[in-house]
Amino acid sequence: MREQREWVTAGTGDGLGSSGTVAAMGSETGVAVNAVRVATTSGALTVIAEDRTDVETSGRAEVSREGSSATITATSHRVTVRIPAGIDIVVGSMSGRVKIIGRPGAVAVVAESGKVTVEHAETADLRVRSGRVEVGTVDGTCRVRAESGRIVIRRCGDAEVTTRSGHLTIASASGPVRAHCVSGRIDIAMAVAADVDADTVSGRIAVSLPAGASPQVVGVRHPPTIAPPFDCIVTARSVSGRVSVKVG
């Protein structure tokens, strides 16, 4: 069970802050908040998950609460939201940069356009129509769906990544990986021997596995010569592009 945290009142009583001030909404006795939702139409949004027990906003934002969830609607061009580490965060953005710093719980972002950056999360579900996506570390499942733009995941458990157009990089995965791209390059480095399913219509695919892995390779014209028993299955297909699978 997720630890219960207190929602502490700060700033103006109506929960409406302005640039240079801090605002949060709560009650005199405190309310347990396990999730924060942030909506913004344009501009830069920064969410900082840190060692604290309240939620604060800087920049103009409207704050409301329903049960254990807090909803923040950004009404200025630049807003920073500070939340307790470990709680879930959901962000909806029409246009502009979204940056999540620190260690929240589950992270979900839906953005029409703009760069999305997640430093660290328990799980991540990121959906971007157009813009670059950068992920530092995801302890569990990392899901990314993008129409166009480069995707970089530095470290994750298992991953499901889909993009129509752009370069997709997973630098270190410790669980099964599924990656799909219509037009673009796919680079995947596995930290453990786990299944990989990667395909692109146009672009190069490169998959590397750790030393000692014994993959069954499917879809590669000249697969590495590895005798069974196999400890993982690597499927890599490109209609137009070079495909390589390396061990060690």
Image (tube, rainbow, N blue to C red):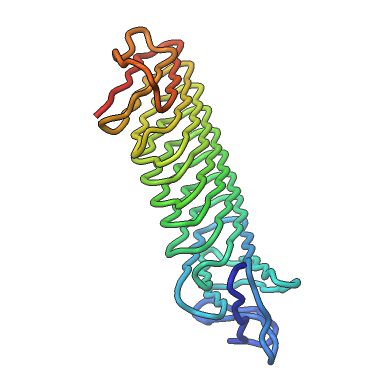
Residue nearest the observer in this picture, 211 or 149: 211
Please state the total of marks drawn on the protein image: 0
Q: Could you tell whether 77 is left or right of 209 in the image?
A: right
Choose top left, top right, bottom left or bottom right for residue 56: bottom right
Choose top left, top right, bottom left or bottom right for residue 204: top left
Q: Can you name the residue that lies furthest to the right here?
A: 66
x, y percent for residue 85 = 49, 70
Is 3 placed above or below 236 here? below
Q: Residue at x 45, y 72 (%)?
A: 50
Q: Residue at x 54, y 44 (%)?
A: 113
Say which quadrant the C terminus sits in.
top left
Residue nearest the observer in this picture, 73 or 110: 110
Q: Residue at x 49, y 59 (%)?
A: 44
Q: Residue at x 66, y 78 (%)?
A: 32
Is 230 placed above or below 87 here? above
Q: Could you tell whether 4 is left or right of 224 in the image?
A: right
x, y percent for residue 10 = 59, 86
Residue nearest the observer in this picture, 152 or 198: 198
x, y percent for residue 39 = 64, 60
Q: Can you name the residue that lies furthest to the top here?
A: 221
x, y percent for residue 114 = 50, 47
Q: Can you name the residue that lies furthest to the front here?
A: 229
Say which quadrant the N terminus sits in.
bottom right
